[in-house]
Amino acid sequence: MFRELFEPMTIGPMKVVNRVMMSAMSAGMMLDRDGQITPEMIAYFIERVRNNPGMAAVGACAVVPTPEQWKYPVPIYSDHVIPSLKRLVDAVHQYDTKFGIQLWDPGGTEGGKRTLISPSGLSSNARAKGGAMMGPQVNRGLELDEIGEVVGYFARAAARCEEAGLDFVEIHAGHGYLISNFLTPLFNRRTDHYGGSFENRIRFLIEIVRAIKAVLGNRVALGVKFNGDDFLPSDGWTLADSCRLAPILQAEGADYLNVTAGVVGAPRLTIAPMYEPQGCYTHLAEAVKPQVSIPVGTIGRIKNPEMANDLIAQGKVDFVGMGRPMIADPDIVGKARRGELDEIRKCLADCRGCMDEHMRSARRGEVTTSCVVNPRMARESVCIDIEGASKHNPKKVLVVGAGLAGLEAARRTAFSGHHVILCESRDRIGGQIRLAALMPGRQEIADMLPWYERQIAKYGVDVRLNTMVNEALLDSIAPDVVFVATGSVPQVPSGMIESVSNAASINVAMIDDLLEEGTPPGNNILVIGGDQIGMQAADFLSEGGRKVCVAEAHGHFAPKLAVHDRWYLLNRTDEKNVRRFKNVHNVVVDTADNVWIVTEKGREHLPGIDTIVFASERRSNRSVAKIAEAKGLKTHIIGDAFDVVSEDGGTIFATIAQAYDVARFV
């Protein structure tokens, strides 16, 4: 199975055992106060390379010295990191994986407190007006004599990589980072020989390649990762530029090319959410490949081995990058090799755990990464899961509710060897995730349900559908432990009940009821609530040309969604002319069916509203917990039943993680 995917290849001096690369990512980068690689970071990589992907790399390691004490990224600009880096390399080299590091500088990409450097002192955010920085961070355009100094930093960083025993280095020349800034006309306004023409804009990259080759020779492989397309409407780096650059890089000594895409603020983003199709950027690598004879790789939403194998078998690329799929399931390569495709826990491309947690944690003064579907991500050294650990002293566990929280609690406790009964009031498992999968562009969010079905069957969970849990059933089962995962229900915000009760002919519905019952909505709809549920509902309801307005009580829309998902969702609703109103204090409906929204700016009439959908406030459903606790049963409340109002409450990310963390201690 997957003959082409597991065919060896040669990259420069490397003999690579297969065509899968664990893409270089910032994920898993866990350092101590001195920037040294920690045992936790080693455990993260070992969890993945023990399944022998052909290549793996540490992402985005800093080559330019900075005076700030950084907890992130790896400071490859300093000799002091070499010993801990060598420990990581030696650990990885127990396996048949070639290991590398990505040489990087953020350029004009904002984040943190350090002074940024760039070709022209402009922000790398394509939305920045006139290139002005969008925050207080200083961005300094490089002086001519400083450019050679930065080239030297890249070369010395590469030398440290060789000293640590790495097999390859990858120059990051994409995503709006420093080298990408030089390539892209929008960010490069220089008038010297590093700006203007194509030849001038690639000069900085070519000088870096030459300097690194001079240091490494042919002893360590050299790759270059660059954008196939910035996806900017104008003044961007294009696919035609990439096809022109590729043979030049080969002639200068590059051993492989890795084709990526996008910059911050472009219509299509570097880390693609589920709104992008699987394999969304493979066409770029496919266009570059005929221009060179060295291996060309692709990345971007390649989440299953079937697609990866097809891309190679069809001659479109030479190798595939799998980043987030290896976060979601560290054993994806091993399972593909063994033909255990049904066992693969698929990446959902819901960026709330990986990309978004990385950004949110950075704002808190730390940098961590997690995963929506894999709560052990970045905790591999402390969350040691041993199958059957409790089989000699099993407990009878009752899980009430078969949404995601209940499924995870049932899976994890059964995995440990407990006797688990899972009761669900509906005729199928999945809970609200089945409703979420009805939303446009988000069907893949239900990909986890078949996996959970197989896991709970494998570990012997007794699933009882169409079963309401009451006092009598609790007495009958007599569980040692009860997990209450009964979710949440939508409710009308306080103060609006009387107002909407005035409606004579306007249809008033709760979002859950509308979706579950398949009730046809009207043609002029007001959605009350603009967080993740409300905005997705607006996207759903605006299909087919319906007119939709959204009224949100707070100052932002869909803050619980990952920023990349939100970017696509808001663009989608803008294209369909969905009107958004924030800081809405009240919605007023009179007996003649006139509807007004009330904000600090006053009242605005919304003519012709025929449907009002409530998709804002939710209330945790804990009624079973009260019964179980009254009977003295050990009771755990998880998922939406536990929390639906906090920053993370009501998200898949929080739901699975909390259920896992409680269940593993039973």
Image (cartoon, rainbow, N blue to C red):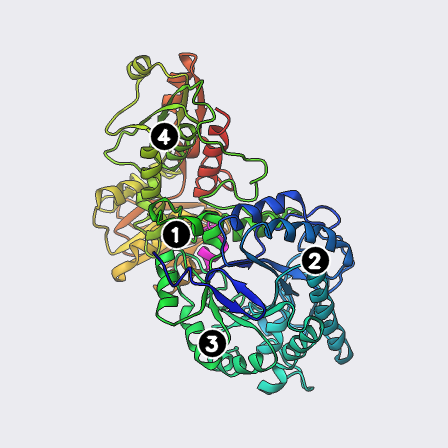
**Disc number lying in front (4 or 2):** 2
Nearer to us in this view, 331 or 196: 331
Q: CA distance from mark 2 to mark 1?
A: 31 Å
Nearer to us in this view, 560 or 578: 560
Task: Name the residue type under label 2.
Answer: Ala
Left or right position of 310 against 650: left
Q: Which residue is labeled 2 in the image?
A: 164
Task: Name the residue type under label 3.
Answer: Pro
Q: CA distance from mark 3 to mark 4?
A: 47 Å
Q: CA distance from mark 1 to mark 4?
A: 35 Å
Residue 565: in magenta span: yes
Q: Residues within 10 Å of mark 2 (few under 14, many from 20)?
A: some
**Disc number lying in front (3 or 2):** 2
Q: Which residue is labeled 3 in the image?
A: 233
Nearer to us in this view, 651 or 285: 285
Q: Which quadrant is home to the N terminus?
A: bottom left
Q: Which mark is residue 486?
A: 4
The disc, 3 or 4, on the residue closer to the chain's N-terminal end is: 3
Q: Which mark is residue 600?
A: none
Q: Which mark is residue 336?
A: 1
The disc, 4 or 2, on the residue closer to the chain's N-terminal end is: 2
Q: Residues within 10 Å of mark 1 (few under 14, many from 20)?
A: many
**Disc number lying in front (1 or 4):** 1
- In the rendered view, tell whether residue 518 sits above or below residue 322: above
Is there CB contact under 8 Å for labels 4 and 2? no
Q: Which quadrant holds residue 373? A: top left
